């Protein structure tokens, strides 16, 4: 089952429950559904983690942890998937989400000549914040749902394949 593969790479549940940076979750951290590896909790974790990965905000992991607690998805997977957007991948991902937002809004901004300076960032932020935010939320929803459906489908396929293999072995 996919559970064995995932469990192989998962951190120790007991160590995470005692981790000082997760203490702000209080008693919610001991909710068993946050730690189960089943089709429902893992697919929800992909929904949460991928959605939060596309949010152009600081501390995406906290948002992912709160959402994981709220919808009872697997907490480590939800928080871990946020790292799809890391310092190396953020520029291309957020540029893509900006382009998506700019396209969907239908009012493309004037051509922006990029310059690496604080003055440029302060002046151009007012032009790009709305398309960036809108595109990020849309991409987060789309990729989150795609991740959810992919895990649901893969898990069902893998379980069906395991049952067929087991039936072949017993014949």
Image (spheres, helix red, strand yellow):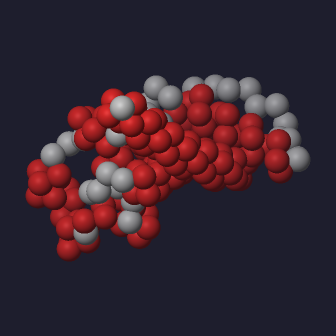
User: Is any part of residue 64 visible from this angle?
Assistant: no
Could you tell whether 33 is left or right of 137 in the image?
left
Q: In which quadrant of the rendered image does the C terminus lie?
A: top left
User: Is any part of residue 69 visible from this angle?
Assistant: yes
- Report the number of discs: 0
Where's residue 163, x and y in %?
41, 40
**Residue at the spot x=36%, y=53% of the render?**
38
The residue nearer to you, when weighing 103 against 45, is: 45
Where's residue 49, x and y in %?
46, 49
Q: In which quadrant of the rendered image does the N terminus lie?
A: top left
Q: Residue furthest right?
A: 106
> In which quadrant of the rendered view does residue 75 lie?
bottom left
The residue nearer to you, when weighing 69 against 58, is: 69
> In which quadrant of the rendered view does residue 26 lie?
bottom left
The residue nearer to you, when weighing 66 against 73, is: 73
**Residue at the spot x=40%, y=57% of the render?**
41
């Amino acid at each position: 089952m996919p559970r064995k593969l995932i469990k192989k790479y998962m951190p120790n549940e007991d160590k995470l429950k005692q981790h000082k940076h997760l203490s702000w979750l209080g008693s919610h951290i001991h909710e068993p559904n946050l730690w189960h590896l089943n089709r429902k909790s893992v697919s929800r974790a992909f929904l949460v983690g991928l959605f939060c990965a596309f949010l152009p905000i600081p501390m995406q992991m906290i948002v992912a942890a709160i959402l994981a607690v709220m919808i009872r998805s697997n907490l480590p997977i939800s928080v871990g998937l946020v790292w799809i957007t890391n310092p190396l991948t953020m520029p291309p991902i957020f540029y893509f989400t900006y382009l998506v937002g700019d396209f969907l809004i239908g009012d493309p901004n004037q051509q922006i000549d990029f310059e690496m300076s604080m003055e440029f960032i302060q002046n151009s932020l007012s032009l790009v914040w709305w398309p960036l935010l809108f595109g990020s939320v849309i991409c987060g929803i789309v990729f989150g749902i795609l991740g959810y459906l992919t895990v649901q489908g893969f898990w069902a396929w893998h379980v069906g394949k395991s049952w067929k293999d087991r039936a072949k072995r017993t014949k």
